[in-house]
Amino acid sequence: MLQRVLFIAASLLAATLAAGAATAGVTRPPNVLIVTIDNLGYADLGCFGNTLVRTPAIDALARRGVRCTAFYSASPTCSPSRGSLLTGRYPQRNGLNVQLPGIKGNWGVGLPADEKLIPAYLKPAGYATGCFGKWNVGFAPGTRPTEEGFDEFIGFPPGQIDYFTYKYQGRHSLYRSTEEYHSDKYATDLWADSTIEFIRQNKDRPFFVYLPFNAPHSVDPDNYGPGERVQYKVPDKYLALYGSKPGEDNERIRYFAVISAMDDAFGRVLRALDELNLRENTLVIFYNDNGANTSHEHGLKFASNAPFRGGRPDCWEGGIRVPAIFSWPARLPADTDCDEPLIATDILPMILAAAGVPPPGDRVLDGIDPTPILAGRAAAPDRALFWEYGTRDVHSAVRQGRLKLIRTSRSKPFELYDVVGDPGEWRNIATRHPDVVERLTAAHEKWLVDTSRRDTKP
């Protein structure tokens, strides 16, 4: 009898140890960190060719990941761009294809309440979810971040704020969850510090963090007090990187300093991942929300979208092609380039595949999982990418392969460019390829009809 008891006890112990070993051998789903920056120029980072700006953390990320040279935002302006990222759907399909204006717009309905955001997909899979920074897709009750799947939110509803006072058009605009919040930190540091704290608190479970920096968005005179000089605000130590003193009045240097402050804050987030031994299995996605607005009336005379034409909010390459880096040491190669055309709506399918979450059955996602493409195992499919944005002069565009169709008004004919051989879009080849113009025009018209059916499968 004693032998039988001992045998049973030994068997149970062996089974327990085997189960523990099996569990230990299972790799948990990857952590996901999405970092967006705000209205940066394509050529305003060191790893994208700028020899003047100091961005060592972002440059190091490029060396540890895949630098994408043909990555596109789904819109040339902030609100629709961010809505498409969070939903994985074109702005025409998710119902937010306008830039939210003013107090009423930014605190009103942006994305419709029935849209499903990234954190809502990941929470049932056991993810902790946090958002720290710029929201800008509507802040009406029922559509605020912590009502859309985020466990934690510290940030602001509108498109831009003062970096120190958190004011937007005279209104205090910093929130924690749904309540007003106050901080004496520089905004860029607040977003990074909140992210680091969240990661430390959730290091033992998979997490998803959306870190939308508002840097280096241009300054807005409405956010400044009477007699206050309208210029970029940045801690003095970042001006010192460029040999400047606190009173520096060269706005180009101040612009670079704001970028460097963002780079430094982002670097601290990456170091926290390293210190916690989380970097190997963390998918870091870093990209700009849309091209820089280089028009003089918006105060950005020094950002550069080179070598591309145009900028925010148009559909020339300068408005929609943006710097992007994907880093996931466990799955993606280091120090490589991807020249295949990818778009922000590909991000959600990639995350779902990585987390083992099935795609939704009740709505269309407008992207693909680009992991095999980024890993160099596959070429991008022969698909068309689409854009349309504007209120008066509506810009429309289609890219398929190396060819791009674009018009700057619905009353104008489409033009055609080879954006590989002519990235600046200066040589219109529409008359040489009327068949291509006809085919892509028909595809664009079909896309407009298709995306008007918001939640049904095609």
Image: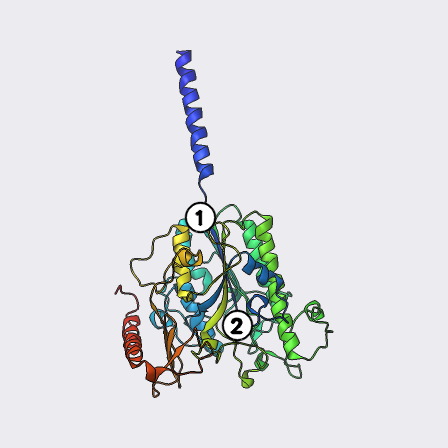
The crowd level at tag 1 (other Cα within 10 Å; few <14, some 14-19, many 20+) is: some
Residue 190 or residue 360, whichever sits in front: 360
Residue 198 at x, y = what percent? 55, 54
Q: Residue furthest bottom?
A: 411
Q: Residue at x 58, y 50 (%)?
A: 274
Residue 440 at x, y = what percent? 31, 76
Q: Which residue is mark 1?
A: 29
Is residue 281 in view?
yes
For the residue marked with disc 2, what is the amino acid? Tyr
Quick check: 225 above or below 73? Answer: below
Quick check: 8 above or below 257? Answer: above
Asked which secondary structure carries label 2, the reply is loop
Mark pair 2, 1: CA separation: 32 Å
For the residue marked with disc 1, what is the amino acid? Pro
Quadrant for residue 314, please give it: bottom left
Quadrant for residue 255, please give it: bottom right
Q: Residue at x 70, y 70 (%)?
A: 236
Residue 383 at x, y = what percent? 33, 67
Asked which secondary structure carries label 1, the reply is loop
Q: Is residue 378 left or right of residue 306?
A: left
Q: Is residue 252 left or right of residue 397?
A: right
Q: Residue furthest top?
A: 1
